[in-house]
Amino acid sequence: MTPEALAGIKVIEFARFAAGPYCGKLMAGLGAETVKVESPSSGDSGRNRAGFLYLNTNKLSVTVNTGHPQGKRIFLKLINTADVLISDKTEREMAQFGLEYAELRRLNPHLIITCITPFGLTGPYKDFKSYYLNTYHASGLGYLIPVSQDLSREPIKLGGFSGECACGVSAAVATLGALFWKKTTGKGQLIDVSQQEALISMNRPQAARYPNEGIIPTRVEVPAGTGGLWPCKDGHVVAIFADGRQWKSFVELMDNPAWATTEYEELSYRAVRDSETKPLIGAWMLEHTREEIFQKGQALGCPVSPVLSPEEVIEFPQFQAREFFTSIEQHHYGKITFPGSPFKLSASPWSATKTAPKLGQHNTEIYSKRLGYSVQELDKLHQEGII
């Protein structure tokens, strides 16, 4: 059997809900033994969200009260057996547990600490707490959406927790780089991931315009004459024709209507007459289905795409052919289907074979087999609320 890419790597995940757990999920899917450390009283705050089941596949769960002296000792023993610690705690939070990052590195010089915090471990905001909504807007991304004709509308964030997961991806990439460096030098290091910086890195062109050009980018309506969203016979499609080549292919898609003269190949001409052409395009769209528009448009090199419902996304033939969505039997919930890996490794594929763990499900396995605690000792620690 081909070993998984990160087989033998031991990861401790000391993080909540999205960014840190998504980093841990990616590593667990590549074969790392990822142990999720949670509070014995409440666990990960994300356990009350459906997303927890998706974010924590392939992981093990142990509980420990790091605020208790004995709990702290157990945590430090875990750290001494690990290659990687994923944490979303600021220096101040770690100091409250008596678990400063510098001390952890001293105890285990081979340890890679991947710290994911709202604003990073340095600077005047280093101890500030933040929700995803806060860090998203602190990155400037919210200033750019929604793209709307009503520019007085308040800014919003990207739907769901996409930005949080993007931060997790940044952390995972940095961690893989640190693992490569460790293999070469034998040394660990501290990775300081600022969620604010990870998010603003998603929008580099806009972020660079003001310091270099003095231009303040903001959310603007879709420029006239470049396309948009249209209702069609059985739903909606998006069509883009920002340049002359795209416009020509779109005109061919519409079977070359008489009104689409050569003057329309110039964007400035289309922009001036946008209010006239939109009803004409809309009338043609309503005579055709999404699939007709999509298939013919793709053949002509025209950027058109159907707007899919959640059900249609799951059943999308491209996803089906690549077996992107995967299903796992989850305790209490039965069979659950969720997105698989966004990448495919030919020799050591990513996989999701284990369901998200119950709170403390692997206490005996980890504390007995890895740390050497007896069953009697674990019972006592449980009774005292330490694990």
Image (cartoon, rainbow, N blue to C red):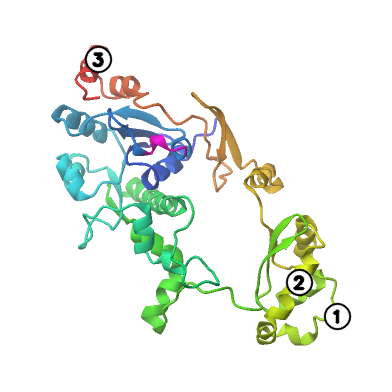
Residue 258 shows which numbered tag?
Answer: 1
- Secondary structure beneath dot 2 equals helix
State the image quarter where residue 346 is shown: top right
Residue 281 shows which numbered tag?
Answer: 2
Residue 72 shows which numbered tag?
Answer: none
Q: Nearer the viewer, residue 189 or 67?
A: 67
Q: Main secondary structure of the magenta part?
A: helix
Q: Is residue 303 visible?
A: yes
- Secondary structure beneath dot 3 equals helix
Q: Which residues are magenta?
A: 46-50
- In the image, what residue type sits under mark 2? Ile
User: Left or right: where does residue 63 sit relative to residue 306?
Assistant: left
- In the image, what residue type sits under mark 3? Asp
Q: Is residue 186 visible?
A: no
Q: Quadrant of the N terminus?
A: top right
Residue 379 shows which numbered tag?
Answer: 3
Indicate the position of residue 212 as horizontal and vertical percent values: 39, 81
| Residue 212 is a magenta residue | no
State the image quarter where residue 301 is shown: bottom right
- In the image, what residue type sits under mark 1? Ala
